[in-house]
Amino acid sequence: MKILGHLHTINHHKLLVMKHCFQVGLYRQGLLHDLSKYSPTEFFVGCKYYQGTRSPNNAEREATGYSKAWLHHKGRNKHHYEYWIDYSVNKEEGIIGQKMPVRYVVEMFMDRVAASKTYQGANYTDAHPLEYYENGAGKLGKMIHPDTAALLHVLLKMLARDGEEKTFRYIKEHVLKEKKMDRKRYKACRKK
């Protein structure tokens, strides 16, 4: 049952992300999203620690002290800010989060929405992805680039306030047409 349950969960999640990415024009990313979850390194661990109410990576981490599946996953999927952690060119800064390309920030947003829908089920509201992010965002520190964090936070707040249709339209018509992120602009958007 754990194999089928886990397979159903990752298929459901992947299809939601694909649907959402397609709505904003990210067709390639929608199709390729999370393919590493089907690799033996991630899939079998997912089956072993499957619970259906949260990521099996959390259960693996609790059982072993780290998640081998997560380390594999975040190193292969550019929509995770952890993929973009590297040494700064400024030696005093040490390891920091690098600025993510906008299309991957949008995919990260879609990933968070789909994960909330998958695990919350009928209890999902458009506020859940924001709540989940804000409960953990304070611990990110230098691990996520400020511009990346600002854009993600603006999109999550917009989703909670204005709903999916308006947020996805904003992403398609404005965010994905911009050539680079502007943290000041996103901070101004948060106030609206």
Image: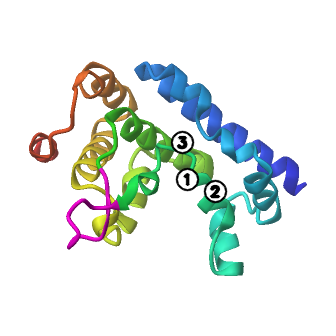
Q: Is residue 187 left or right of residue 138?
A: left
Q: Is residue 72 left or right of residue 29?
A: right
Image location of residue 144, percent across then percent down: 32, 58
Q: Is residue 77 left or right of residue 35?
A: left
Q: Earlier in the sequence, mark 1 or mark 3?
A: 1
Q: Amino acid at mark 2?
A: His
Q: Amino acid at mark 1?
A: Gly
Assign the C terminus to one quadrant of the image.
top left
Count of labels in the image: 3
Q: Quadrant of residue 42?
A: bottom right
Counting other residues with Cα less than 10 Å from the Cα at mark 3, is it few (<14), some (14-19), or many (20 or more)?
A: many
Kindly report the distance in space between the C-alpha atoms of the residues bearing marks 1 and 3. 20 Å
Callout 1: helix, strand or loop?
loop
Q: Main secondary structure of the magenta part?
A: loop
Q: Earlier in the sequence, mark 3 or mark 2?
A: 2
In this view, the mark in front (3 or 2): 2
Callout 3: helix, strand or loop?
helix
Mark 1 — residue? 75
Image location of residue 142, percent across then percent down: 28, 66
Image location of residue 169, percent across then percent down: 32, 22
- Looking at the image, do the residues carrying marks 3 and 2 touch, with CB atoms under 8 Å apart? no
Region rendered in magenta: 87-98
Mark 2 — residue? 72
Kindly report the distance in space between the C-alpha atoms of the residues bearing marks 2 and 1. 5 Å
Mark 3 — residue? 114
| Front position in the image: 130 or 98 | 98
- Looking at the image, do the residues carrying marks 2 and 1 touch, with CB atoms under 8 Å apart? yes
Relative to 42, residue 182 above or below: above
Residue at coordinates 48% horizontally, 27% vertically from top-left?
A: 21
In this view, the mark in front (1 or 3): 1
Residue at coordinates 77% horizontally, 43% vertically from top-left?
A: 8
